[in-house]
Amino acid sequence: MAKSTQAEENEEEQETLRGRASSFFFGFLFQTFWDFTTFPLSAGSVEPIPMICPPLTPSRLVLNWLERHRNPVSFVLHMIGIPPTLIGVMLIPVYIYCLSVPIFLFALANFVGGYLVQFLGHALEGTDPGEIIYFKRKLGMSYVDIAPPRPSRRGVT
């Protein structure tokens, strides 16, 4: 009976260690992603320790961009369209060095395609793209910077 008790104690100890490791890991992830100013001290610790270098607050440009892209579909279309646009721009030096027509066509297709996807997001959201806003502002024309809220369909029968 002593052997089974000792084996049971070992199993309990291992389960406890696994549980602590698991709670520390998931607690660390939760606290890292939801509270960016502190890190947990240990698995059983209640008091978090402050981060050495907490993240900076987002710049005004980033906050403005996020405010202008509140529609989730527009935001996703921008996340899809921005990388090909940047790839198209970054391939310009490669094209200049190689003078390759296929590289030029690939870069052009990425750039134009990425922009079209982003413009589609703005069309769905009902706002003008930032580049169009710049020129409309310079010409004194009216523009839509932030989409007006859509009426609720809950009252409609």
Image: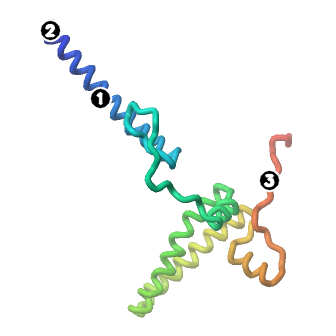
Q: Is residue 10 above or below residue 63?
A: above
Q: Indicate the position of residue 104 as horizontal and vertical percent values.
A: 47, 86
Discs 2/3, front: 2
Q: CA distance from mark 3 to mark 1?
A: 52 Å
Residue labelled with disc 2: 2
The answer to whether residue 44 is left or right of residue 132 is left
Residue labelled with disc 1: 17
Residue at image coords 72%, 61%: 125
Residue labelled with disc 3: 150
Look at label 3 and name its amino acid: Arg
Q: Indicate the position of residue 25 as horizontal and vertical percent values.
A: 38, 39
Question: What is the quadrant of residue 128 in the picture?
Answer: bottom right
Task: Identify the mark nearer the N-term, 2 or 1.
Answer: 2
Look at label 2 and name its amino acid: Ala
Task: Identify the mark nearer the N-term, 3 or 1.
Answer: 1
Discs 3/1, front: 1
The reply to whether callout 2 and callout 1 are in contact (CB within 8 Å) is no
The answer to whether residue 14 is left or right of residue 112 is left
Between 105 and 139, the residue placed more toward the observer is: 139
